[in-house]
Image: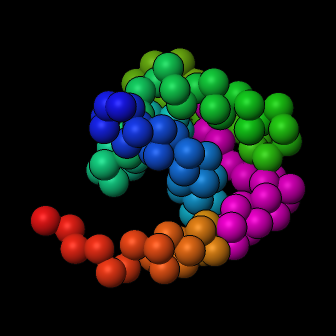
Amino acid sequence: MKLENTKAQMRKGILELCVLSLISKEEMYPSDIIKKLKESKLIVVEGTLYPLLNRLKNAELLKYNWQESNAGPPRKYYQLTEQGSEFLQSLLLTWKELNHAVGESTDKIKVQ
């Protein structure tokens, strides 16, 4: 079993939560989302993010608007819908419960 594969799967599992959380703070352009995720060590490439954004939009959790850009064509900026905000709150509650459960399971293990 490869450690890098497991680490990548763990990151993918929380990516939706992180993307929705970022967008809940302010409407965002995809490259800004990627930058924020990379800063947080959640390495993401466009090929991962764009399908996720599209899926979240199709599920009516996100919407977008076009904004003019000084650097080229208009850009899509994403924001949460009301349904997306409710979904995010449920994910955050689940994350809190999971975080607690994992902490309980691993709190006495020393990391070297």
Say if the magenta span includes residue 84: yes
Q: Where residue 57 sits in the image (x, y, percent)?
A: 77, 36
Q: Is residue 33 visible?
A: no
Q: How many marks?
A: 0
Q: Residue at x 85, y 42 (%)?
A: 60
Q: Where residue 103 sits in the image (x, y, percent)?
A: 45, 76
Foreground residue, 108 or 38? 108
Q: Residue at x 54, y 31 (%)?
A: 49
Q: Residue at x 79, y 59 (%)?
A: 87
Please determine whether, in this image, residue 109 is positioned above or below residue 8. below
- Left or right, 20 with respect to 62, comes to left
Foreground residue, 78 or 6? 6
- Left or right, 48 with respect to 43, comes to right
- Left or right, 39 with respect to 97, comes to left
Main secondary-structure element of the magenta-colored stretch: helix
Q: Which of the 4 image quarters holds residue 15? A: top right
- Considering the image in quadrants, where does the N terminus appear? top left
Please determine whether, in this image, residue 85 is positioned above or below residue 9. below
Q: Where residue 21 sits in the image (x, y, percent)?
A: 58, 59
Say if the magenta span includes residue 23: no
Q: Where residue 28 sits in the image (x, y, percent)?
A: 55, 46
Foreground residue, 71 or 10? 10
Q: Which residues are magenta?
A: 76-94
Q: Is residue 83 visible?
A: yes
Please determine whether, in this image, residue 3 is positioned above or below residue 51. below
Q: Residue at x 70, y 62 (%)?
A: 91
